[in-house]
Amino acid sequence: MVTIGELASYAGVTVRAVRHYHAKGLLPEPERDNSGYRRYDAGAVIELIKIRTLAEAGVPLARVRELLRAGQEEFAAAVADIDRRLQAEIRERRRHRERIARLASGDSLVLPPEVVEYLDRMRALGVDERIVQAERDGWIPLAAHSPERVPEWMARKRRQLDDPRLVDFYLILGQALDRADDDPRLIELADKLAAYLTRMADERGEDYVDDIDIELPLIKLMDTLAFATVPPARRLIELLKQRGWTGWTKLERVTSTPGATP
C-alpha cells in the first residue's frame, strides 16, 4: 500500500493531478486508514498510468473512462475517432499559424501576393510611402470584392510600372503631397497625368483605361480612402477634369472645360 504522494511519483504525475482524477471520477478514491491517510494498492498505480498515458495522447478526460473500460474493437474505434479529431485540430492550428505569420508580414494579411509584390515594387522605385498606402487601402476592398480579377488588373499594373513616364508621375505626385492646392506643381502633375491617360487611351483604347467594373458605392469608398491618405488628390481630380479626364478609382474621358490648358 502506498500514499498519494508515492502513487503520484510512481505514475509520473502530481498529487494535484491525482486529486483531479478523483474529482472527475476516473480514479476511485480509496478509504482512509486509521491515521486518516489514503492508501493505494498496485492496481491504482497501473490505472493511474493508463489515465496519464491517455491524457498525454490528447484524449479528452471525458472519454478516458470510456476507453479504460472498452473492449479491443471498441477501443480501436474510439482511438481512430480521437485521431481524426486531433488531425482536424492540427489543420486548424496550422491555419492559425499561417494567419499569425501574415500578421507579421504587414500587407500580406489582407492582400493577394501579386498585389503585395506590386506595392513592394512601387517602394523600390522610390514612390512616396503615402501613395503606396493609398494604393494598398484601395486594393484591400477591391481584392475582397473581385478576387478573380486581381491577376488581370495586376498584369496591367506591372506593365504600367514598366513605363518611366508613369513612374515619373508617381514621383512628382510624391513631391506635391505637402503642397497647397494652388501650387504650380499640381498643375504640372495634372498636365502630365492627363497626357499619359490620353496617350494610353489612344494606344490601347478607352476600355483599357476605364475597366473597373464595380458598383458606385465601392468606387466612392476607394476614392474616399485615397483622398484621406493623399489630400492633393481631390484638387488633382478637379484639374484633370479641365483636361478631359475625371475620376480617381474609375477614370473616364469627359469634354474638357473651355479655356482650360490643353
Image: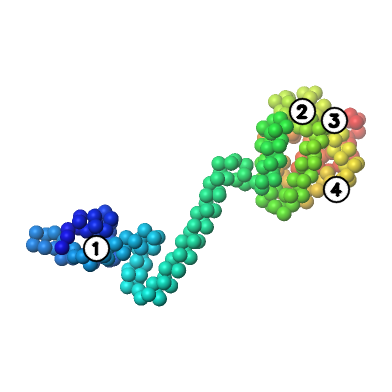
**On the image, numbered disc 4 is attached to which residue?**
207
Task: Name the one closer to the observer, 167 or 74.
Answer: 74
Lateral position of residue 181 relative to residue 55, left or right: right
**On the image, numbered disc 1 is attached to which residue?**
45
Q: Which of marks 4 and 1 is nearer the N terminus?
A: 1
**On the image, numbered disc 2 is attached to which residue?**
172
- How many residues crowd around disc 1 within 10 Å: few (fewer than 14), some, or many (20 or more)? many
* Disc 1 versus disc 3: nearer the observer: 1
Give the image quarter of residue 134.
top right
Q: Which of marks 1 and 3 is nearer the N terminus?
A: 1
- Asked whether disc 2 touches disc 1, contact meaning CB atoms under 8 Å apart, the reply is no
- How many residues crowd around disc 4 within 10 Å: few (fewer than 14), some, or many (20 or more)? few
Residue type at the position of mark 2: Ile
Task: Locate the N terminus by quadrant.
Answer: bottom left
Q: Residue 37, position in %: x, y? A: 13, 59
Task: Name the one closer to the observer, 210 or 227.
Answer: 210
Q: How is the image coloured?
A: rainbow
State how far apart marks 1 and 3 are (Cα).
Answer: 87 Å
Residue type at the position of mark 4: Asp
Number of numbered labels in the structure image: 4
Residue 239 can be seen in this image:
no
Lateral position of residue 51 relative to residue 239, left or right: left
**On the image, numbered disc 3 is attached to which residue?**
191
- How many residues crowd around disc 3 within 10 Å: few (fewer than 14), some, or many (20 or more)? some
| Residue at x 15% of width, y 65% of height | 31
Residue 121 can be seen in this image:
yes
State how far apart marks 2 and 4 are (Cα).
Answer: 26 Å
State how far apart marks 2 and 3 are (Cα).
Answer: 11 Å
Task: Locate the C terminus by quadrant.
Answer: top right
Q: Residue 261, position in %: x, y? A: 89, 29
State how far apart marks 4 and 1 are (Cα).
Answer: 79 Å
Lateral position of residue 109 relative to residue 68, left or right: right
